[in-house]
Image (cartoon, rainbow, N blue to C red):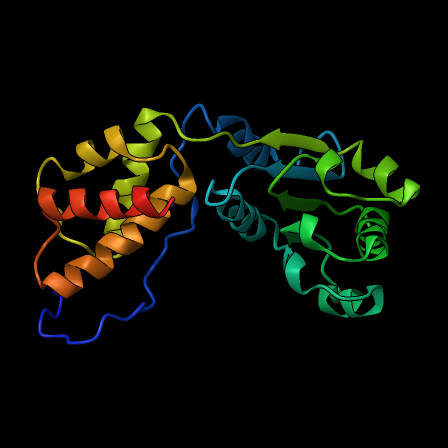
Amino acid sequence: MSRQWATQLVLDLPFSDGDRLEDFLRSPANAEALDAVLRWPAWPAPALLLWGPTGSGRTHLARIWARRSGARFLDGNRLGAAPEAMEHLGDARHCVIDDADQVHDDRTLLHLYNMIANQGGNLLLTASGPLGAWGLTLPDLLSRFRTAWSCEIREPDDALLAALLVKQLQDRQLTVLPGVVAYLARHMERSFAAARRIVRELDRASLRARRPITLPLARAVLTADQEDA
């Protein structure tokens, strides 16, 4: 699909962000977490906890597992009290709680865990940090989650950072001239969040300039990003 360079307004339009197994970029930073997801249903515990920084792919992995297992996908930011959460779960045997560290009521997590475990199902939880950083206070919940299989997703290495930039540029159908990705990978902040942020700003800058992403344009976007940091 060609870009419409005559567009006067720069809008954050929806784009296809591939979240299937074939779209996931394996690297030493995430290999343990990916292998854990693919090991299902032979998990050593009822629950798997995937934690790592924003943009690290933990939600992507959770969606891969949800497709494989038929799990109900719940957003931890939107889960209320236990009765409401049970209603969202329905008759599902397996469940994902994305951003589980953002669930406000420990009792909601405890009830969901007990319901899934009692029916022989599995629970996958994602979070931005390890269990100890969640601020959980219910002893029964802590004792259950401490038996979970926990995998960290680390910040990207050189190869993954470059591949991540390429994937996100392709997801947005952006035209990039030679040398841009290599330059960005060498000079940008080494994080998943930075890669997503910079690609978004490249998209906007490209629309404003009505041209493909050149090295000077990439330098300007990167400089602005570093000044804003």
Q: Nearer the viewer, residue 222 or 122?
A: 222
The count of marks equals 0
| Residue 67 seen in this snapshot | yes
Report the residue at 32% width, 39% height from top: 164
Residue 156: % across, % down: 40, 30
Q: Nearer the viewer, residue 24 or 38?
A: 24
Report the residue at 34% width, 31% height from top: 160
Q: Is 144 on the left or on the right of 170, as rendered?
A: right
Q: Is 133 on the left or on the right of 180, as rendered?
A: right
Q: Is residue 8 above or below residue 57?
A: below
Q: Residue furthest right?
A: 139
Q: Dividing the picture into quarters, in which one does residue 7 lie?
A: bottom left
| Residue 1 seen in this snapshot | no
Q: Nearer the viewer, residue 109 or 66?
A: 109
Q: Is 53 on the left or on the right of 188, as rendered?
A: right
Q: Is 210 on the left or on the right of 17, as rendered?
A: left
